[in-house]
Amino acid sequence: MPEKYIYENYRIGRGDEVSGRDYILYRFYEMLPGVLSWLTIILAVVCSYIIPLYTALFIIAFDVFWLLKTAYLSLHLKENWKRIKEHMAADWVEKLVHFKYDHIYHMIMLPFYKEDEKLIEKTLKSLLKSDYNSKRLIIVLAAEARAGEEPRVIAAKMKKKYGNEFGHFLVTVHPDGITGEMAGKGSNISYAAEQARKLVLDKKNIPYDDVLVSAFDIDTIVYKQYFACLTWMFLANENPYKTSFQPVPVFNNNIFEAPAISRVVAFSGTFWQMVQQERQKRMATFSSHSVAFSTLYKVGYWQSNMVSEDSRIFWNCYMKFNGDYIVTPMAYPISMDANLAHSFWQTMKNIYKQQRRWAYGVENFAYIMFNFSKNKNISKWEKFKIFIINVDGYWSLATNPLMIFLLGWLPIILGGREFNTTMVSFNLPYITRDIMMITMSNLILSSMVAVSLMPSVPETKRKPKKFYHIIQWLLVPFTITIFGAIPAIDAQTRLMFGRYMGFWVTPKHRSE
Amino acid sequence: MTPKQQFRYILGLFSVFVIVIPIIIFYTFGYRISDNFKIVKTGGIFITNSETGVSVLLNGKPKKAAGIIDRNILVQNVKPGNYTVNVEKEGCRPWVKYLKVQEELVEVCFPLLVPSELKSEEIPRYIPVEKSDLKKGAKRPKPELNDDYTDVIELFKEAKKPAKSIFPAWNSKEITALKLGPMRKLKSKVFLSNEGNKIYVKWIGKKDQLPFFINTMSKKLVYSPEKTITAFEFYPKRDDAFLVQFDDGSLYGVEIDTRFGNQNSYRILKYCSRFLVHYEMLFYFVGDKLYSIDFES
């Protein structure tokens, strides 16, 4: 008889937390994405040398596939853009009239490290400005003990200033050095959520089912009707305790201050989330998301022993409920900071590190596959689909830009003299260039969506020229290679060799 | 987007993929549809070029011109057969080759485009003093040596010494064995030698990098003139052509490529007593006067 699957036994952060056969299995899955990516790159080089003609034909076919895939994703982007515009235009407060919703509380997790007081204040003010009864908002300002005294002082100051304006305002300080924890957002908000349960929900007798938790970043600015929209979606959902709610992250807070590369990278992230919103079955939570407190409590909050707690929480829920869990795409934006530092190069470094941290979400793959091997309640077909979706996602991110923009030239360079006299060899650069040009035409849609999602230019800023915001999209081949493929390979390689990453806090910076 | 819509899009795009891929692949191989709607195999001609305003003619008919960014020219859709290829540029002497085009293959050409009128400039030994600069009745000052002149003289002196790489590590045994000097020249991996008034070429690089204008790994005779060769050097900024000086003082530019029975050569100077190539510059003496020609201008 197969062993009963107990979810709590398998909240694994990394391979070295298990032993014996489980260790080998977990490490195998940790290594697989990196091995596949490196195998692709090595094969591209070797095949370009040994069988340049077939490699060239494969590259042409792959370029066409990429063109069609881009077109397919653009259709999703367009669809989601339409839905976002509809949702932004809707009056969610009005729509809520049809529901009884006074009992619903929103617990807002605001973890912070050493961020500026002004930044925190701006976030709190945006919460107060939202079209939702602020007395139904529970603010959990989650500081880190390892950050020193200053964050506690800031938190106390914020509580004093805004404490009475919200329903509840809790300040937590996550202790440093708890055994088995990794310093980072996951461990901080898990601790804070448990504190909030004990000190607010239990004390005030608030049912866990009536609380929706929004795990935000400290720079997350909500649009006016975010909570009304979220409440509506929660109440209208057929299965509200078996779903997470995912808004669309836009990086608008400092968009006019960020350099073009940072803007393009930020919007590329937004677009990917928009595309995913239209492919619900491929979705996992990302960055800021919301979930019922009772669900969160059942799964033991966010995992505190790994980096990508934002997406892992979805897989935790998925495993806990034996696959009966899904993400509800909200098609409603929330705004965060684009990467910006004091100097251009520091901004570039920060973008790279942030992208690498996001790409380190590949650590979820081992968790999913390992849990699949233990959980017999999920169908094999479902497991196979998720395996393919994940392998394709990680492999594409790490290798496709390299194959398209760099490796395409390899047969010409390595193919040798005989190949270099063929029509195929001479046609290869022209055909790939033409296909790329057609593919790039999809960027017209991207630039239109980006411009429409951007806020109006503040009066203090010089008005940016519209064509500049369109031209910047020509940076895409560069950004998806340097800030897409390379950090993804970096993250996968680290995981492959068991050199586990820690949580890197993205520094927040806004010009005055 | 509903799963049904997604399925429709996937099906549609998959159909496009299945239809488009064979068409593109056949096109890449050189298959074309002829005027009478038959599928024919074609070849091509590739013109290696780095200049603007260059155009290609096949059998006297204009075929293609160099682009603004990509100046190399690929002439496609060429039916297999023999062709006269002319590469033209305004202000340059005509370049002609007789090529045999084969199906699915591309012939590569390296046209040597020599300006019709080469602009030479004298480099005076002394910095000239303008008459207006002299005060009335003042003594003519001692002439000041022209730095440009002395620099070129240094280059001529250097050229007489055995060739050495800037970094000693680069002087591999292989290069030392070539015994480079006035009769033996090396550029990139192309080695030229003058043996008994005949110029030979040898590729000393890897076989898979062998350039088309040499086309053999063995030593190959590329020039055998009637007149006596007194000096030779690689053509400025090129390794597929050389300059050769004869005993009557004339200087010619000759391409290394002897394929297809036609080797283009052009007279560069009617007379010079000695010459030197330094990057894109040609320096030469006529008597004791030094001149220069910039091949990039």
Image (tube, coloured by chain):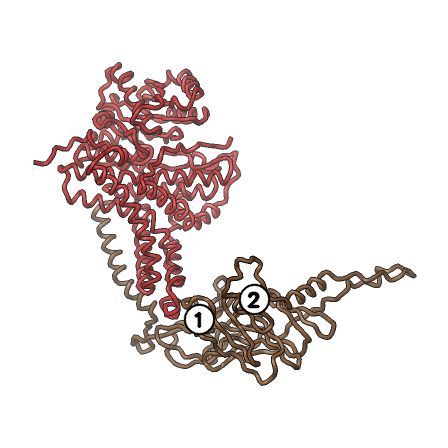
SS for dot 2? loop
* Res. A316 mark: none
Quarter holding residue B18: bottom left
Image chain in red? A
Looking at the figure, which quarter contains the N terminus of chain A?
top left
Quarter holding residue B181: bottom right
Q: How far apart are the alpha carbons under marks 1 and 2?
A: 20 Å
- The residue indicated by pointer 1 is B46
Q: Amino acid at mark 1?
A: Phe
Is A416 located above or below residue B225 in the figure? above
Residue positioned 29% across, 19% down in the render:
A195
Quick check: B76 left or right of A289? right
Which mark is first along the chain, 2 or 1?
Answer: 1
Say which colour chain B has: brown
- The residue indicated by pointer 2 is B237
Is A501 located above or below residue B75 in the figure? above
Q: Amino acid at mark 2?
A: Lys
SS for dot 1? strand
Residue A81 visible to the viewer: no
Location of residue A414 in the rendering, given as x and y in whole percent from the top left corner? 38, 62
Location of residue B174 in the rendering, given as x and y in whole percent from the top left corner? 49, 66
